[in-house]
């Protein structure tokens, strides 16, 4: 007991932080080194993590059945990607959904029509092995182009409308590779019984050895 309060219980197989040092800090993230010890045998181990603000992205659907997407150059892979609009949640953002709609407006010039619906899809951890944040996904529709883009100095974005019917094939061909976007579409599919059943059927395909594949 410390000051009349019980110590928090430490879960089995946990790493307990003993010391933390910020190695680098920028406008969007910190690189942090943590000196930790095992809850099981006290062995030490250093870990590195990226501490970042939450992210948001949004799937915009037009009146004529298209998804508004953005194509932009990504430094991490030194190539272009096809994504849905999104960005970092700013510290002053009180509403993550409003932040996602702002990213839609700024990156594409599209806005929701009066009476449009905007609903959350999922808020997964981006990569819990090294990142502390979440990526919040939404879907909105119908939307319509209303204004010009309002891009940041570090953005060069081409806007593309992709017919809804083409989207599954584009994903299957590997044209959309950003894992957070793929997760948003997968999570959206899981909101239907058909989507859940399709995954179950596919997993069941691997229960038997009727058609073994050499490994």
Image (cartoon, rainbow, N blue to C red):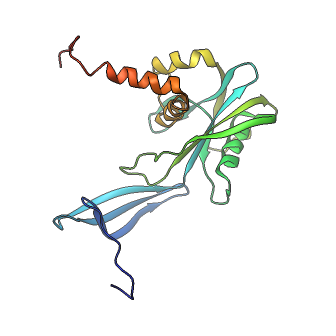
Q: Is residue 147 left or right of residue 189?
A: right
Q: Is residue 130 visible?
A: yes
Quarter where residue 64 is shown:
top right
Q: In this view, does 56 lie to the left or right of 60?
A: left
Residue 148 percent coordinates (x, y): 78, 34
Quarter where residue 49 is shown:
bottom left
Residue 182 percent coordinates (x, y): 49, 31
* Image: 193 above or below 139: above
Observer-nearest of 5 and 89: 5
Observer-nearest of 129 and 25: 129
Q: In this view, does 150 lie to the left or right of 121?
A: right
Query: Residue lying farthest bottom?
Result: 3
The residue under the point 45% across, 24% down is: 197
Give the total number of marks visible in the rendering.
0
Can you say which quadrant of the picture contains the N terminus? bottom left
The residue under the point 27% across, 65% down is: 36
Residue 208 percent coordinates (x, y): 23, 18
The residue under the point 51% across, 22% down is: 194
Observer-nearest of 156 and 126: 126
Observer-nearest of 193 and 66: 193
Residue 140 percent coordinates (x, y): 69, 35
* Image: 117 above or below 194: below
Q: Can residue 148 be seen in this view?
A: no
The residue under the point 35% across, 86% down is: 2
């Amino acid at each position: 007991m410390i000051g009349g309060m019980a110590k928090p219980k430490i879960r089995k197989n946990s790493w307990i932080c003993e010391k933390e040092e910020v190695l680098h800090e920028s406008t969007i993230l910190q690189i942090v080194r943590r000196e930790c010890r095992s809850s099981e045998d006290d062995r030490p181990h250093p870990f590195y993590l990226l501490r970042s603000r939450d992210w948001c992205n949004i799937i915009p659907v037009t009146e004529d059945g298209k998804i508004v997407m953005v194509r932009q150059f990504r430094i991490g892979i030194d190539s272009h990607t096809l994504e849905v609009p999104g960005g970092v949640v700013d510290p002053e953002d009180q509403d993550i959904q409003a932040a996602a709609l702002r990213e839609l407006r700024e990156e594409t010039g599209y806005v929701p029509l009066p009476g449009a619906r905007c609903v959350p899809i999922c808020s997964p951890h981006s990569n819990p092995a090294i990142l502390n944040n979440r990526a919040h996904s939404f879907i909105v529709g119908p939307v319509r182009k209303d204004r010009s883009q309002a891009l940041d100095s570090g953005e060069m974005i081409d806007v593309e409308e992709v017919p809804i019917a083409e989207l599954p094939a584009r994903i299957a061909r590997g044209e959309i590779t950003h894992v957070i976007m793929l997760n948003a579409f997968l999570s959206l599919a899981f909101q239907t019984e058909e989507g859940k059943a399709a995954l179950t059927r596919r997993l069941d395909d691997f229960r038997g050895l009727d058609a073994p594949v050499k490994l």
